[in-house]
Amino acid sequence: LQTERARLKALIDNALVGIVPLDKKARLVMANPAAEAILGLPLTPGMRHFALESLDFRQPDGEPLPIRSLPVVRAALGGEVHRSVELSAVRPDESGGRGRVHLLASAMPVRNRHGKLKGAVGVFEDVTERKRAEEALRENEEMFHKAFTMSPEMLTITSLEDGSYLDVNEAFTRIFGY
């Protein structure tokens, strides 16, 4: 049993995702080092979920996300299952300021063998770089589309397989009439 516990602790401590079990009153049972690193603050056992309000959690549309609505809190208090929920939080950054971190969170309730709710386990990962890359790609696609569409030169995009037109710009349609 001691070997299994040591193995489980090593697995949790070395996971690249944040892992935070809460009890049935949504108090923190423990947090792995990744959870503290991702959120940028120490997480101590017994900490109430309300202590996280300084992180200013937000939904993907920027609307505030109340602490009681966090996936792991809802799982701990209400037994709900949440998978791949996007949210963001503000954390201290290296320069002493605060920066927004984007998270992908999942949470599962923990029940005893009789099915009684005992708490929950939340798992989350920092997807900030992925979100930045997606935004940069979207901006580049928009810039390409504008340049392609508005160019005074005739531009076409054709299929390599059969040479069929996939897209033509306004100059092309103005000159050829379609």
Image: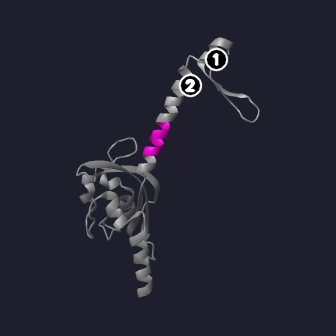
Is residue 21 at all visible to an observer of this figure? no
In the rendered structure, find residue 172 and report the number of the disc placed on it: 1
Q: Residues within 10 Å of mark 1 (few under 14, many from 20)?
A: some
- Circle 2: element type: helix
Q: Residue furthest front?
A: 153
Is 137 within the magenta? yes
Mark 2 vs mark 1, CA separation in Å? 11 Å
Q: Main secondary structure of the magenta part?
A: helix
Residue 18 visible in rendering:
yes
Q: Where is residue 172 drawn, in percent x and y? A: 64, 17
Quarter location, residue 8? bottom left
Identify which amino acid the numbered label 1 is placed on. Answer: Phe
Residue at left offset 29%, top offset 58%: 40
- The residue where tag 2 is placed is 148
Quarter of the image with the C terminus in it: top right
Q: Residue 152, percent across and down?
A: 56, 16
Compared to residue 67, the image places residue 42 above or below, namely below
Task: Name the one closer to the observer, 25 or 32.
Answer: 32
Instruction: Quadrant for the N terminus, please.
Output: bottom left
Q: Which residues are magenta?
A: 132-138
Among numbered discs 2 and 1, the one appearing first in the sequence: 2
Residue type beneath disc 2: Phe
**Which one is in front, 107 or 177?**
177
Vertical comparison of 91 with 151: above or below: below
Q: How many marks?
A: 2
Residue at left 49%, top 35%? 140
What kind of element bears circle 1? helix
Q: Is residue 33 magenta?
A: no
